[in-house]
Amino acid sequence: MRGIFNLVCNLNFINKEWFLTLLVFFIGCVVRLVPELFAYPSPIGYDVINYYIPVTTNFTIHWTQISSEFPFYVSFLHVIQIATGLTPYSTVVIFATVIFGVFTVSVFLVARKLLKVDIRYAFFVTVFVIFQMAVLRTTWDLHRDVLALTMMFFVFVIIYRESERKGSKNLNWKFILLALILCVLVVSTARIVGSLFVVSLIIYSSLVKTRAVILCTIVAFSFFTIELYMNQNITSNIIHENIQKAGDGSSVHSTFYNPKNLLYLFVVVDGLLVPTGIIGFKQLKNGTLLKIPVLITAAASFSWIVFPFDELFVADRWVSLLGIFLSIFAAFGLYQIIRRMKIRRPAHRVSTSTNTPTLSNPASTILTSFILGIFVIMGILYEIMPNAHEPFTLWYGMARSSIEHFVPPSMQFNSLQLSDTYKMISAISWINKNTQPNAIIIGEKDWRGFMELYLEDHRTFRFSDDLPTLTAGLIKHGLNAPIYIIHYPDNRSKNTHVYSNILFSIDKIR
């Protein structure tokens, strides 16, 4: 009878774990879908409007560019778009939503297997992480990074499981094969996450020296090296991933990439996580596999100390990655604090799967819910508040002038205020109806996605950080085509004014 009872208890526990896994997937999808619904029909995300949707729409035209900058993700988007017949916009949004749901599951598994906490606390960790600004900013438009991080966490879970089986001579080749496939996909999806993954594996394999980890390290390093070798312009693509690429060869040095702004960025994105993150880092035993990427991203986040104005080190991107990993430790640190406050009953219940006490006492549950609720509210406000009302996002609305070039103060933004999107489309519609089919349109690089999607016939869009220089160059070349410039009305021009819709003005240069 006792054996039957234990079997029933185990089955109930397994069913509960599967239910929570599906629940966190659903929650992740909802969290990612909410800002899209508030923004509909406008897309959110800088790279979404300027890269993912245009590339998915005109995949063949962009293949030369795609093939030289880690093409897996956008190639998969193209395949899905063809297979389903969905519009490029729907394809990008749906896939980003599903990927974030899977990312949420990967965080849940990390909490269960690496942190080794009970199911209820794993749920707490998962919800805490997905509402952090670093995570929401990443899923805003860096969809490739979210996918790469998701697969990275799955690999961590698998190889940590195999590392615990040191006494076993037989490898579970089904899991090893899955880990190897994921290793290849991680390094083929996103350069920065891929580099973090490879370096983390190299360091971890030198410490644990297990066959599974060493094999994954060799495969990941080999394929990452191949990807870099096949890429003919690494520096250019790093800049592209940081959304700092200029158009048509003309650019000026960025004034916003400086130590002051990067320090503000760190404070806003990671500052709230540091105190409890340090506690969680110290308290987590046998957490080397998670601690390595935290230390790497922390060092890279402060690369500006040595190279204060060199954008190639993309310290802003590393700050966001640090926030993702640090949030896991911050959640663990919060749990340790709650335990030490001794607000549980003397005889607390112990989880059947781990030695970690569950948060069954009402007082601890209330405190945990209160802390989690604060971050959830801040996250929701960051998702749905219009960009013009960022002070309502509390902490995230601080230091906007210093950090807005790195992170949006709200997810309700692409390269324009969402409320201004229709005005841009209206201006492009006027261009299509009132200019010659071979006209050249000059404007800011932030608008290149809209121009590619909505300009008709053979009209072309040229962009640059230095529009006067670009304009002078086009005139000097004597191109046999009319030239127009689109700009904000406050940018006064000596050219012939031909159109205005309050937000955008169009002048004819010749």
Image: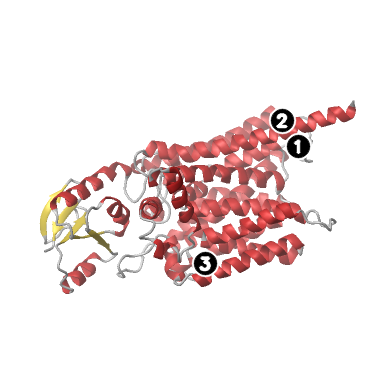
SS category of the residue bearing label 3: helix
Q: Quadrant of the C terminus?
A: bottom left
- Depth check: give the residue in front, 66 or 507: 66
- Crowdedness near tag 3: few (<14), some (14–19) or many (≥20) residues, C-alpha within 10 Å: some
Work out which residue is located at the far bottom of the displayed protein and give it: 476
Residue that label 3 marks: 303
Q: Which residue is mark 2?
A: 360
Give whichever of discs 1 and 3 has the lower sequence position: 3
Amino acid at dot 3: Ser
* Three-letter amino acid code of the residue under disc 2: Ser
**In which quadrant of the rendered view does residue 382 lie?**
top left
Residue 137 image offset from top left, x and y in percent: 47, 49
Q: How is the image coloured?
A: secondary structure
Residue at the extreme top of the image, as rendered: 1
Residue 357: mark in rendering? 1
Q: Are marks 1 and 2 in contact (CB under 8 Å)?
A: yes
Front-lying residue, 311 or 261:
311
Give 266 or 86, whichever is nearer the viewer: 86
Say which label, 2 or 3, has the lower sequence index: 3
Q: Position of residue 355 (x, y in %)?
A: 79, 41
**Quadrant in which the N terminus is drawn:** top right
393 and 351: which one is in front?
A: 351
Q: Where 259 sits versus 119, above or below?
A: below
Counting from the top left corner in percent of width and height, residue 112 is at 70, 43
Is 430 on the left-hand or right-hand side of 4? left
Between the residue at mark 2 and the residue at mark 3, the CA separation in whole angstroms equals 43 Å
